[in-house]
Amino acid sequence: MPTLGLPGTKLHYEVSGAGVPVMLIHGMGLDGRMWEDQVAALSDLAELARPDLRGFGRSPRDSDVAYSHAADVWALADHLGWDDAVIVGLSMGGMVALETVLAAPSRVRALVVMDGVIDGVPFDEPSKAMIAALFQAASAGDLVAAKKVWFDCGFFAPARRDAVVAKRLEQMVADFSGRDWLGDDPHEPRPKLFPLLPEIQAPTTVVVGDLDVPCFRAMADEMASRIPGARKVVVPDAGHMVNMEAPDAVNDVLREVIAVAA
């Protein structure tokens, strides 16, 4: 993988295809490998960049250098010679995608948020309990136990029905450094996204799996209603990892978005 040297990291990324520039932003505990089905299907009409955000995959992170994921995304876009891009993110990557759009709205051709996380919508009780157990294990220094809590949680339950998808997820979680669970993250203060959603002017598509946990379905509802002109796509028989569980349906949506953004 090529790397981009930035203060506090060497950002690993992959670029495939040619055409409309598209940035693919992965979820918590995962990395750019989660987008393999999209790269295989869309490289004929898009130049697809998929970074490992710092602290994830093969991108290291210094604990004493301030940064923001949104700034890293635009630094990578600059490095690739992109004036603008379609921004796509899933889960935590959806949050980063929103922050990226708000950081440079004039550079955004379109936004796609899949099963994205935002503030302002409470997590459901089982998800709260899972997160508490995860951080309890991480704070005790047991990253193996923390990763087991994460992989076994309801977020990934629909994806675990498919042995191939489950294995891909398991490998990414195993490779995760766990840095974001250890409390040494010098990320700059993040904006409160909920009140800023009406300011987003980019053509926006909100995708959610109909088997995702309740809080993410509620978050999708809020994004779809609060972002002006946003459309909502519900993918049947898919959960939180909608792009991996239902790649054909997601690729169809992305192909439409890219065609309009061309």
Image (tube, grey):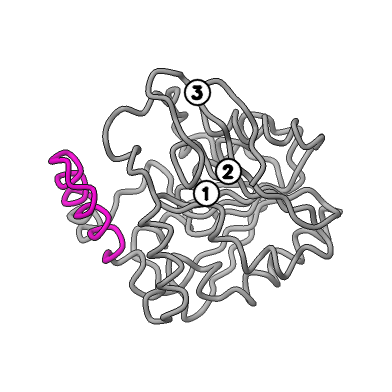
Q: Is residue 260 left or right of residue 171?
A: right
Crowding at mark 1 (Cα within 10 Å: few <14, some 14-19, many 20+): many
Work out how far the residue at label 3 is from the one at label 1, CA to CA, in angstroms. 23 Å
Q: Mark 1: which amino acid?
A: Gly
Check residue 29 in the rendering and tell me which mark sits there, or answer none. none
Q: Are marks 2 and 1 in contact (CB under 8 Å)?
A: yes
Q: Which residue is mark 3?
A: 8
Give the tally of numbered discs: 3
Q: Mark 2: which amino acid?
A: Ala
Q: Residue at x 68, y 70 (%)?
A: 251
Q: Mark 3: which amino acid?
A: Gly
Q: Residue at x 34, y 58 (%)?
A: 215
* Above or below 161: residue 176: above
Please provide the residue range marked out in magenta.
Answer: 131-153
Residue 81, quarter of the rendered image: top right
Crowding at mark 3 (Cα within 10 Å: few <14, some 14-19, many 20+): some
Q: Are marks 3 and 1 in contact (CB under 8 Å)?
A: no
Q: Main secondary structure of the magenta part?
A: helix
Residue 170 position in % (x across, y down): 38, 65
Residue 189, quarter of the rendered image: top left
Q: Residue at x 60, y 73 (%)?
A: 247
Q: Which residue is mark 2?
A: 97
Find numbered disc 2 in the image and state the secondary structure of the residue it sits on: helix
Q: Residue at x 46, y 68 (%)?
A: 168
